[in-house]
Image: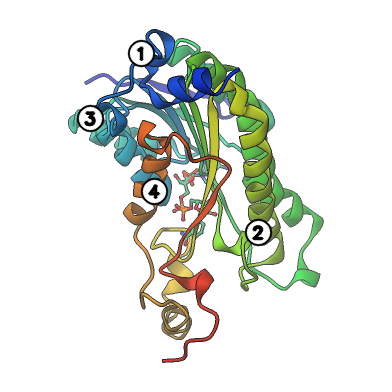
Amino acid sequence: MFFLLFMCASTSSSFNKRSLSALSTPAAAMGDSTTLPTKSRRWSLEGMTALVTGGTRGIGHAVVEELAGFGASIHTCSRKEEELVDCLKKWQALGFRVTGTVCDLSVRDQREKLMAEAGSVFAGKLNILINNVGTNVRKPTNEYTSEEFSFIMGTNFESAFHMSQLAYPLLKASGLGNVVFISSVAGVVAINSGSIYAATKGAMNQITKNLACEWAKDNIRVNSVSPWYIKTSLVDNILANKEFLDNVVSRTPLERVGEPEEVSSLVAFLCLPAASYITGQIISVDGGMTVNGFYPK
Ligand SMILES: NC(=O)c1ccc[n+]([C@@H]2O[C@H](COP(=O)([O-])OP(=O)(O)OC[C@H]3O[C@@H](n4cnc5c(N)ncnc54)[C@H](OP(=O)(O)O)[C@@H]3O)[C@@H](O)[C@H]2O)c1
């Protein structure tokens, strides 16, 4: 059995031109950009390359499988070698093309190594970057230490910003690029998940708009997906508290929390040629929570 695993932890004019190539598959984007894609091409990621950060669990794991199911080749990462190896073996058995790097994305030079490795696996061309890695420390604002501020800012926002900078030349080289930030409803409305976490997600939502405008000339679309509570290891502990879970459910029009696959489906859609006119958007996957003003049961 062979799969590629890298270690970078401590060891380790015009409207016509732009819109037609954006509507095409990568091959068509590089060649015959006047041919509109067939229906099946609009709904396929065949031949495309993707870097998904934090693919071993939760939302990132579901995104890897969703993009692979649409035919993309993927590079992913996490800090835990054993978990990453297990995932790579599972994906290989499923026939998915996935490689990985062990790295900590809160560390600048490890982000640089990750992008260098993804660049070497994909021959310098990247179609899709999913900035998924994120963490949280929940506490009242006046109790945060400066270390906690740096940790949450570094892992959630600085990392996603820097990964986007690093990915830009590869996205541009592909002729058809997409960036999706995994943000949160905490960056859209005020919820009690911690003010630093909320600030990182609000910042992500803002740069989504800036990068969408700045990079449109390079055929790179940029969007943000903002989930409400999704069943993953990040929030297992919180959702295990029945009283809190009941509060979450009662605030959610669809009366339940979400599954990772309900987020990954939107992420994949945004990356498809079928979504070629969508950029700069912040879309919530939240069972209706953010539109729920006052509808008591
Ligand atoms: N779950 C929710 O309810 C929810 C709601 C709104 C937004 N989100 C956002 O969705 C994203 C994914 O969250 P999740 O719930 O799927 O989290 P999760 O279950 O904790 O999974 C996080 C993934 O990222 C990896 N990771 C974490 N920190 C890393 C680092 N510093 N360097 C490299 N890899 C790292 C983890 O692997 P290792 O631990 O092995 O490194 C794991 O693969 C986050 O940005 C989060 O803020 C989640």
* The disc label shown at residue 27, or none: 1
Q: CA distance from mark 2 to mark 3?
A: 39 Å
Specify the quadrant of the image occupied by residue 191: bottom right
* Residue at the image point whose x is 79% and y is 60% from the top: 145
Camera-nearest label, 2 or 4: 4
Q: Position of residue 5 (x, y in %)?
A: 40, 23
Q: Position of residue 278 (x, y in %)?
A: 49, 41
Judged left or right of residue 223, residue 34 is left
Label 1 CB-ligand 1 distance < 8 A: no
Please tell me whether mark 2 sits on a helix, a strand or a loop.
Answer: helix
Q: Earlier in the sequence, mark 4 or mark 1?
A: 1
* Residue at the image point whose x is 62% and y is 39% from the top: 160
Q: Earlier in the sequence, mark 2 or mark 4?
A: 2
Name of the residue lying farthest toward the top: 31
Between residue 44 and residue 247, name the one nearer to us: 44
Q: Earlier in the sequence, mark 3 or mark 4?
A: 3
